[in-house]
Each structure stands twice: as C-alpha cells, then as structure tokens.
Amino acid sequence: MDGEKIPTKLLAALLPPSSYLPSVEGAVKIEANVAGKYDDPNSYDVSFSGAATELVINENSFGEVQFSGRTIDRLLRAEATATFEGRPQRVTATLNFADQNLPFQLEHDLDNSPLRPFLALIPQLRGISIGGTATGRVQFGGDLSRTLPDGQRELTASGLSGTISLSQLSLQIQDTPLSATEPVMVRFTPYEVVFENAKLAGGGTNLRISGTKAFNDNGINDLALDGRVNLALLNVLPPIASTDTFFGGFADLAVRLQGPNRTARLSGTATTENASIAAFIGSERLSFDRVKSRILFASDQAQIASAEGYLGGGKFVANGGVLFGNDLQINSYRVGINGTNVTVPLPDKFITTGDARLEITGNRIGTSLTTLISGSILARRSLYTSDIDLASIVGGRREGALTGGGSVLPTRFNLSIEGRDALVVRNNIADLTASVSLRLTGTSSNPILSGRIVANEGTVFFRKDRYQVQRGVLEFPPNTQLEPILSLIAEADIAGYQIFVNISGPLTDTELLNVTVRSSPALPQADVVSLITTGSLSNTERGISTIASTGINTAAEVITDSIINNPARRATDRLFGLNVFEIDPIISGDRVNPTARLTVGRQINNNLRVTYATNLSQDQNQVLALEYRVSNRLSVVAQYEQRSLSNVTRNRDNFSFEVRFRRRF
C-alpha cells in the first residue's frame, strides 16, 4: 500500500476508540506492506515507512515526523523521529503479534529534551500553557487486545499504563518557572496519574505532590498538596483564565483531595500572605492587595475563616465561602467586604473613594457563574474626569437593558452611593463639586443610575465663557425610558454684562428642555442671546445673530454651535494642540454680506486661556486675547484687535487691558 497526503484522522479511525487518545491532524505519506490472516495476528507480517507532515496534536504543532517499522519473528519494531527546538527526539516501540493479547511497549529517553510537545499529548492539559525540559526515561505500554465474557476479543486501550522517571525536570508554566529538587517518579494510566515522588520549587513555590489524581468519573482520588505555591499558577487554568480574574502572591497549603473523581472533596487549610486578586468590572480593574487570609476546606465547602487586605489603598476585612458541586465546580459563593477609605471604579467612568459595605455573590446557571455586587458606599470623593460630547447627548435617549447569549455573564449591580459634597467633576464642560444620592443597578455592560446629583457651586464651560453655578440638580429616573431631568441656575460675565441662565427639563430632549436668559444691566433678549452665542452684542459691527434676531425658543438653539464645533475641536486638538475651535455660522451682518466667525486657541489650564478670532469675510476683523482668571470675582484680559477696513477711523490697531471685578449687591 502506497499513499500520499492521507489524513491522519483516517488512520486514527483504525485504532480502538478512546476518549483518552489525543486529537491528531495532518497528512501522512506512507509505504506499507501487510500480510496475514485478519483474525490471526500471529500470522501478521507488517513493514512500513513514511513521514507525517504539518502534524498537529491537541492543537500543538509537531512539524514533520519520520517513522518506520518492520516485523521480525512476529515482533513489530517501529521508531519515530521528530525534531523539537533543534533537538532530534527518537521514540521506539514494539508490538508482539505472537501473543494474542498484543502486548505493546513504547520507550523514549529524554536528554534535556523539550517537554511542550509531549505534554500536548495529554488531553487533560489542553488549554494550559506549560513547557520545559527534562532528562530521564518514559515507558508506556500494555495489552491492546482482551477477551470479552462471550469469548470474543476486542481491541482496547484500557490496559495501557506507563512510568516517568526523571533525574532532571524544569517546567515553565506561563511566566512561572518550576524545577524538581529531587528525582521525580510518576506512574500513569488512561484513568489516573500517581505521584510517587514530586517536589517542585521556583518562583516562590516549594511544593510536594503525592498520591493519586483520577481522570475519569469513577476513579478514586487520594492526592496531597503540601507547601508553598505561587498563586500566579492559578491564572493558567482555563476556568479562571476565562473570567478575567488574576491571582498573585503566595499561599501555604495543606490540602487533600479525596473520593470518587466526580464527587471528590477537599479538606485542609490554605493561608495567604501578601496575596493579590484582580478582576475587571467592565473595562475597569478592581484590585485587592496585601491580602492576608486563612481558608478552611471541609466536605463540599471552603470557608473564609479570616481575611484582610487593601482595596484601592483602603483597608478591608472579608468573610464568606464557596459551595462546590461535582467535579469541584463552584456552584455558589458569597464574599462580604467591609472597607474603610477604599477606592473602587464605580459607577462606570467614576473613581470613588469612601467607606464600603459590599457583598459579592454568585450562582451557577448552566455552565456560567453569575456575579452580583450589592451593598452601599459612603463616598468621600467621587471623581469624574471623562469629557462629555454635547453632540452625543443632545437628542439622545437612555437605552434599555441589552440581553445576549454567551458563556460569560456580565456583572450585575445593586449598589447605593451617598456622599455630601463628594462628587468632583473636572472635564471639558464643568469644574464643580456636588452631593450625590444614587443607586446603581443593571449590569457592567449596561449600568443604570437612578437618584440625584445636587451642585451648589462650581463652574460650567460653554463656548469660551465660564458660568458660575448657583444651583444645579440632575435627576436620574429609575425607569430607563425616562430622560434625566436637569435644573440649572448659572451666571456669567460676558463683555461687561452679567448673564443669568436658567435651564430646566429633560436633558436629552431639546424640545422640552426650557432655557430662559436675562442680563444685568438689562438688555433685550436678542442682545443677551447674542452675547451667549457670539460673545458680542447683536448691534455691533460684527453682525446680528440669526438666533438673536428670531428669538430663543428651545435649548437646541443655544447649543447648536457645540454640535457643529465639537468634532472639529477634537480634530484640531489632536493635530495642532488647539482645544478651542469654534465656527459661528449664525452671524449675518447688517452692513456686509453674510459671513461666519472663526475662533481658535488653547485652554492652558483652568485659569489661563489664549484665543485668536477672525471673521471669514474679505474685510477681516481679528482679535488676539489672553485671559487670566484670578478668582470667580476677578479676572484680567489683555487684547489686541486689528479692526476691519469698514470700521477704520484713525488706526486699525487697538490694544486694550482690562481688569474685571464683579460684586453683587
């Protein structure tokens, strides 16, 4: 028989079926001669040679493997040679056709040989990043045929077993190195592995493994783990790696795993010193550091006898436990955390520091674990620094909860957050302090806020002007179909006039959001709106504002320019470092053709601003201004203006210096 590019899956179909055999993919070129009677192995005469190319075993590449075999005196002798990391690896095997039980024997000598390809042969290690080198001998074999009760014979892999005897062993489990401090002796079958002697050290680990670990449901476990282990080793386990949870530090173990494999139970203790646990809530990282704990294992439970550590710089104490099911799967868990001055990334896009009383619980639903974070946070400081895009808010709507499938269920919340003068907002549209009374529900993928935020002082930025907040309230209705309700009273000093703004209504519904404006000294509403939208009175040489001339009816008319300017502002900030960029398309002159005004500049810090403004007509009016804000009541403005030709009297150049002081009577 000659063949090329024969799929390995076709050849594997000739072997006895077994769930313990690895999956093999690739193509085989083979020349083989087989003679004898089908039902009489004693008559077999087999010889073959060939190569397997692009060989992949349990999703690990083996490259090319050369193999050959020949029957002499009814004994088939075969060998295979592969090259791993530049080192040839030779495996020899025999199969005795003279014995009706078909005894099979495989041997391989290791000489500082790479282990990753061999570990890939073990299905139970699939998905775990583990490699290393070893020196010693591997022997594997047993009968491939057995007699059934009815006298018939069948091919089987159940009688196979082997031993691993190593004088040197070095492992690399992800980023953690481990080495054997003594010779290692391990016995194994398709159903279990027995550690007769295995002591591993490295990366802070000093662990002795002894006893039996079963692979099938009916196997009996009697495994002991004693010593210190680096908790980072847990991160390579697929059930943990799939949850975006990360462990660090060390644990001292005295743990036993005993009983039938499916219902095996743990007993013993585990203590940690300076351990760490990190998990992601949405895109934010929640880290527990310097954790000191003692955990008791008994029957199907693990109880936290004591635990303390630090969460975001604040100290916490914890209690709780885990309930295990079959195959040591976590069926449910509860962890209670009481923290003082802790920092957590809650709610979404906030960094909150305060006293926390949290309870984290979970239950298994099918193949996934739910997670619920409930409790209360008494906020001392909750910082929000993310920029807000007015274009995404105006006309937007709060979305309902999103649902979807998948094996990873999003974290759910039921948290209350309280804090007097605790909320600090510092972003592109506000610099203020507020009190909060909020409830966070929903999931990490779709959080829902309800409650209110109340501000009694601070600054709101609109265009290039600062509005001092007298009172602001933002209500979040619990129903996602209802829009947040804004109530804002603010005032600003624009061109020597005190401007008062009152905004009330649904934040994202511009048709219902009501805006009223007035000034001191009193001005016509058209002039007040012109000051807000253009920074100048409507009857100046710069032109009359279209909005001002037609009146102001909705909030959309006031903030339309922000929708137009924000995308351009972000682009110029990235390209040129200019975070002030405004185009006023609403200017129409009563003396010149309709035009627009361009303003560029940079807000260097909260108190210092540099701007350049010009109209876009042929008859340009250009203004360069430097403004420094000493306090809410005192500011200094230095300005250079090059006037338009149509307004020249004696000199086009005009320099001015203003000290603006505000006092209310």
Image: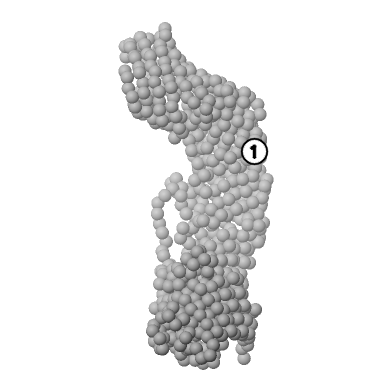
Could you say which is closer to the camera, residue 409 or residue 123? 123
Q: Is residue 59 left or right of residue 464?
A: left
Circle 1 SS class: loop
Q: Which residue is mark 1?
A: 203
Residue sitting nearer the eye, 24 or 260: 24
Q: Which residue does the image show at 55% across and 78% down from the upper left?
A: 624
Quarter of the image for the C terminus: give it. Answer: bottom right
Question: Which residue is painted at 56% across and 87% down in the image?
Answer: 496
Up the image or down, 108 lies above or below 390; here it is above
Q: Say which quarter of the image contains residue 37.
A: top left
Q: Residue 641, percent across and down?
A: 54, 82
When asked about the image quadrant of residue 68, the answer is top left
- Left or right relative to 27: residue 387: right
At which x and y percent is residue 349? 53, 62
Q: Is residue 287 visible?
A: yes
Q: Height in image: 358 above or below 659? A: above
> Which picture quadrant has residue 467?
bottom right
Q: Amino acid at mark 1?
A: Gly
Residue 73 versus residue 86 in the image, above or below: above
Q: Residue at x 31, y 18 (%)?
A: 1
In the depicted view, which residue is nearer to us: 77 or 151? Answer: 77
x, y (%) of residue 85? 52, 29
Q: Which of these two is toward me, 89 or 311?
A: 89
